[in-house]
Image: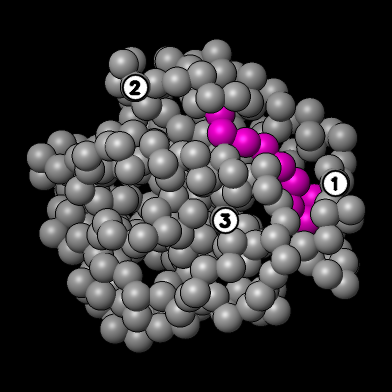
Amino acid sequence: MLGCLAPHPPHVVYAENPEQNEAFSEGGWETLRWGYNRLARKLKTIDYDAMVIFTPHWQTYIGTHFLGLPEFKSKSVDPVFPNIFRFNYDISVDVDLAEKMCEVAGDSGIITKMMRNPDFRIDYGTITSCHMLNPEWDKPLVTISSNRNAHYYSPEVMNEQAGALGKACAKAIEESGKKVVLISSHSLSHRHFVTESPLPEDMSREHIYNHSQYVWDMKLVDLMREGKMREVIDIMPEFTEQTIAETEAGGLTWMMAAMGYPDYPAEIYGYQSVIGTGNLIAAWDPMETTREIVL
Ligand SMILES: [Fe+2]
């Protein structure tokens, strides 16, 4: 089980100009894209059966939901950036693994549901992270919704619930006998610009927006490099509140709990601002023989 922190600004897909996206760009955000390209090359060298992704842009308010049909095909339009992201997707789902996770999580007391609506539109977080990690789209996905505990209760409750979900998913994966890549799809600090530059990919306009947010992000990167993931998860509620981060959805906590809170160094693939938000690409490789110091 290898884990990836994979931010999903649609800008990186826009900048890559894949045939599925209708918009055309002149590039941009290379530091992030080159980091993604390198991690995608590493994943090509690994034998695995499915990608399991937790996304903050499929928000559910009663329980945790799992995609539950073998194929979803449609167009995903980013609600905030329709000018840069209109992506024609055709994804396959590992329904057996999704059902297993739904069942094991349900048995552990978590409210769960399978999504069986063929017209359900896949969120741009799932599409962006999965496209950047596997542009060939040759692995089935399991997509997990984010139950909004932080909205209902507090980031502390979110942390507890996401941890319980992570443990249940790990048990389901183990029982299935499958090898998976886990993906936590989100940025770190999330304070962003309120106006867009005339040309989105104009890199002369891209910069860190707020020094305090940047310092928080670097604190997390340092802890990740040191292999202190338990500490990262312990401070997650405070980090989330201070940086209005997408970690409020529980993705990183879910992934770290599933991986047993790694105490080995994370691989760091890149950090860059996108409209002022802090985006880090990192991976946790449990195999010491293939784990690298990337950056
Ligand atoms: Fe997002």
What residue is at 42 percent from the left and 28 percent from the top?
A: 284
CA gap between label 1 and label 3 equals 18 Å
Q: Quadrant of the N terminus?
A: top left
Residue at image location 63% in from the left, 45% down from the top: 32
The mark nearer the N terminus, 2 or 1, is: 1
Mark 3 element type: loop
Nearer-the-camera pick, 256 or 202:
202
Q: Is residue 140 above or below residue 245?
A: below
* C-alpha distance separating marks 2 and 1: 33 Å
The residue under label 2 is: 290
SS at circle 2: loop
Figure check: 265 above or below 87:
above
Magenta span of residues: 268-276
Give the mark nearer the N terminus: 1 vs 3. 3
- Check whether the beta carbons of the residues at disc 2 and disc 1 lie within 8 A of each other: no
Q: Is mark 3 within 8 Å of ligand 1?
A: yes
Q: Quadrant of the C terminus?
A: top right
User: Type of residue at label 2?
Assistant: Thr
**Residue carrying label 1:** 207
Seen in the picture, residue 215 relative to 35 is either above or below; the reply is above
Residue under circle 3? 8
